[in-house]
Image (tube, rainbow, N blue to C red):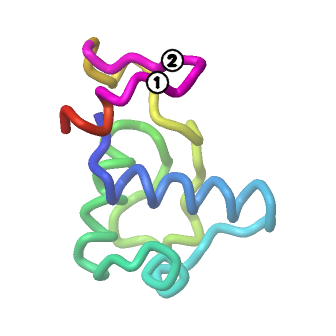
Amino acid sequence: MLSDTARKLLMIMRHCSVHHGYMPSLEILETKSGRTPEKIRAGLQELAEDNYILWEFGKPLESAVVVEGWERTGDRPASVTWGLDGGHTSYWTDY
């Protein structure tokens, strides 16, 4: 299961690459995510280690490639359920 920062960075990176045609810089990620550069680097490292992105630490962020643009469903705990009616709130209340 991804951390909140890593999940947010993945969404921002996917959106920028698919809808705008570029990979965001560190400054753009700081602005859009509201996270510090240290937390962004830790989140990017987590995404790279879990193979969500292809990126080598120390290289420019613009060279990153998004492999999977959303969190894997197998990473969620089994107790998380999603209802079509939106009535299942266990995801929001159990964490």
Who is closer to the viewer here, 95 or 32?
95
SS for dot 1: loop
Three-letter amino acid code at the position of disc 2: Gly
Residue at image point 25% right, 71% down: 39
Range covered by the magenta-colored residues: 79-90
Mark carried by residue 83: 2
- Compared with 65, 86 (above or below) is above
Residue 28 left/right relative to 75: right
Residue 5 coordinates in the image, percent (x, y): 33, 59
- Compared with 93, 82 (above or below) is above
Magenta-drawn stretch, dominant element (helix, strand or loop)? loop
Who is closer to the viewer here, 88 or 16?
88
User: Mark 1 Cα within 10 Å, few/some/many (few <14, many 20+)?
Assistant: few
From the image, which quarter does the N terminus lie in?
Answer: top left
Residue 74 left/right relative to 46: right
Residue 18 coordinates in the image, percent (x, y): 76, 54
Q: Is residue 43 magenta?
A: no
Question: Do residues under tags 1 and 2 come within 8 Å of each other at their CB atoms?
Answer: yes
Read off the residue under disc 1. Answer: 87
Residue 20 coordinates in the image, percent (x, y): 80, 67
Tell me which corner region of the image, top left, top right, bottom left or bottom right, holds residue 40.
Answer: bottom left
